[in-house]
Image: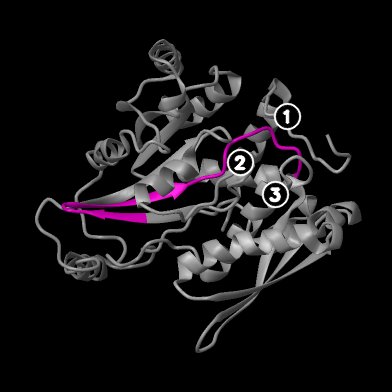
Amino acid sequence: MSDNMQPIDETLDDESLDAVDAEANDAYEDVEEFDPFEGMSDEELDALCDEGDSFAGFGDVEPGFRSGFVALVGRPNAGKSTLLNACYGKKVAITSPVAQTTRRRMRAVVNRPGYQLVFVDTPGIHKPKDGLGSELNKSALFELNDVDVVAFLIDATKPIGRGDAWVAERVKNARSKKVLVLTKGDEADPAQVMEQLKAAHELMEYDDEIVTSSVKNFNVDAFIETVAHFLPEGPRWFPEDMGTDASDETLVAEFVREKVLRRTRDEIPHSVGVICDALEQTKKVLRVHATIYVEREGQKGIIIGKGGEMIKHIGIDARRDLERIFGTQVFLELDVKVKAGWRDDEAQIRRFGYNAED
């Protein structure tokens, strides 16, 4: 293991669980109650209700149309982002074997006859090692009561542990419908799958369950149909042509970071943050500039590589994805800078867009 590697212990011990609980509770307590209708007369409220009756959402929908939000929740590397991409039909959320790959809440809209699903990819809940880790946990927990369905993802190939039990306790208390999703079913034998299902049901009760494999596209459509069944009737939340709520700058930053993770995953993954500094569309090319931030000079050297070879390959890998996403030729410039201790700096975490409120 390189001296620059920042190892992460995925085991959630009692002290860590209590700390995360305290942070989550503090976050909820800090939210001030706000009543938007305070001070309005009965006549004004009646008028407002009449206006609400005429709201049709985005586009006309037939009677019985369903729409709503589905949060993908689970431990790091449970397969949340991979499942989101499989449901959406193309890659919009970054993936890697590295824990904490997902740092931003990502929404992807899936339109099918009779319903619109808004999938919310959340950071994996883990033992926090720094301020960034604490913010990622808060971000995931915040989603539980803001969605119609919580899909609790459990890896079929790894024994269920205390971390899964801790996540299950939070999911159990959510007001949303709960669906158990056993992921990576293609990598587990039938006996292993049955054992995992049994262990998962000892954690909590579910409204439904399903075994999937996003890589093999096994039961992906069935999963979509399963969660759609629990959506309330209502208009579309987003236009039919909208795919994701992520900005162009966010997509650039995330896909550059993914390539850094994949190229340097045994050395510096958790110290990396990326900001897209500029996007300029010209007649022939989209010009993009992004800065990769690390915490130490040695990490900067690893990303640049001997003779600039590593940063060159990172740029080539990222440019291919960005050209697919934006549908145009991309000219990508990358810089690498050192920002010591940024993962424990609340202002820097917010600057990168990794804070829970975002």
Label 2 to label 1, Cα distance in Å? 15 Å
Determine which of the numbered discs, if any, sits on residue 137 in the image: 2
Asked if the magenta segment contains residue 140, the reply would be no
Q: Which quadrant of the view contains residue 12?
A: top right
Marks 3 and 1, the one that precedes in the sequence:
1
- Could you tell me which residue is drawn at 79 percent across and 56 percent down? 303
Q: Which residue is mark 1?
A: 9
Mark 3 element type = helix
24 over 161 or under it: above or below: below
Residue 193 or 67: which is nearer the viewer?
193
Mark 2 element type = helix
Label 3 to label 2, Cα distance in Å? 26 Å
Region of the chain picked out in magenta, as a range: 109-130
Mark 1 element type = loop
Q: Residues within 10 Å of mark 3 (few under 14, many from 20)?
A: some
Q: Residues within 10 Å of mark 1 (few under 14, many from 20)?
A: few
Q: Horizontal placement of 77 versus 152: left or right?
A: right
Q: Amino acid at mark 3?
A: Arg
Marks 3 and 2, the one that precedes in the sequence:
2
Q: Position of residue 77 (x, y in %)?
A: 56, 35
Q: Position of residue 178 (x, y in %)?
A: 36, 31
